[in-house]
Amino acid sequence: MPTKLTTVVIEASDPLRLAHFWAQALEGDPTADGRVIEGPLADGTGIRPRGAGDVGLLFVPSVRPKTAKNRVHLDLAGDADEVQRLLALGAARLDIGQGAVPWEVLADPEGNEFCVLPRADAHGRLAQICQDAADPSSQGRFWAEASGWSLVDEGDWGVSLASGVGDGPTLVMGPPVAPKTSPNRLQLALTASADSDPSTEVNRLLDAGASLLDIDREDAGRHQSRRQPLLDPEGNEFLLLGPSQAEQSGAGG
């Protein structure tokens, strides 16, 4: 496939500390070369969660404070004992107005929301990657094209996509949609296949409904090693990475 979803990029004031929390939370393994990334994703720290298929997490430094609810969050699988384990690692309970729901809402040490779901069918601790969507059907079609994942479920709650490798988290999109006042602190990242042309892949994503962020279309995809920032149809930032960057982030197998 030309591009696939391989990484969740997470901005952090202290990437090493936050990566350490999530490595423990997800039983993640360090990435290949000591976890320090150089180049366009400089100083990033990556982890590969067990049971997450091709998906890795990459923590990158940011001085932007968290000022609102994230549009992207992670859902973990677990029971009450798992919630207690996460609280002991440094998570905190969080009330975002969820009311009486069968899952727990927590925050990581930098305030990023995540949920713990009572799911027995998850392949690993990372059960779902969730992104707010006002039009889940439209967003689902775009992200199926962009990620190479397949639409597997749809309802009033939104849509769910799954990787063709048969394991790892699902990608869930639906309401409610958090107001957007600044770039997302959590962003999805795609990886171009080794034999694809970066400019071709950028144009394919643009034709599917993406838009460019901060650079001209004629300059897009000129260098495979360069990360390409884009916006999805609802204005959520995402990245297109070259194969070498995905290896550094701990994703892409």
Image (cartoon, rainbow, N blue to C red):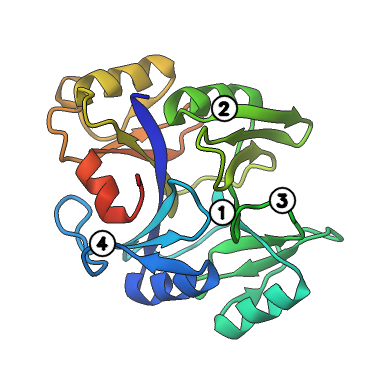
Numbered label attached to residue 168: none
Front label number (4 vs 2): 4
x, y percentage for residue 76? 63, 60
Please state which amino acid type lies under the numbered disc 2. Answer: Ser
Give the residue at mark 1. Answer: 73
- In this picture, residue 232 sits left or right of residue 221: right
Mark 1: secondary structure? strand
- In this picture, residue 31 sits left or right of residue 75: left
Q: Given contact means CB atoms under 8 Å apart, are the residues at marks 4 and 2 in contact? A: no
Numbered label attached to residue 121: 3
Residue at 17%, 40% in the rendered image: 226
x, y percentage for residue 127? 62, 53
- Which mark sits nearer the N-terminus, 1 or 4? 4
Residue at 23%, 47% in the rendered image: 245
Mark 3: secondary structure? loop
Please state which amino acid type lies under the numbered disc 3. Answer: Asp
- Which mark sits nearer the N-terminus, 4 or 3? 4
- Which mark sits nearer the N-terminus, 1 or 2? 1
Give the residue at mark 4. Answer: 32
Residue 188 sits above or below residue 117 on the image: above
Mark 2: secondary structure? strand
Instruction: Measure the alpha-carbon separation of dots 1 and 4.
Output: 25 Å
In the rendered image, which quarter is residue 209 located in? Answer: top left
Numbered label attached to residue 150: 2
- In this picture, residue 191 sits left or right of residue 49: left
x, y percentage for residue 168? 54, 47
How many C-alpha atoms fall within 10 Å of the one at disc 1: few (<14), some, or many (≥20)?
A: many
How many C-alpha atoms fall within 10 Å of the one at disc 2: few (<14), some, or many (≥20)?
A: some
Please state which amino acid type lies under the numbered disc 1. Answer: His
x, y percentage for residue 77? 67, 60
Residue at 53%, 55% in the rendered image: 51
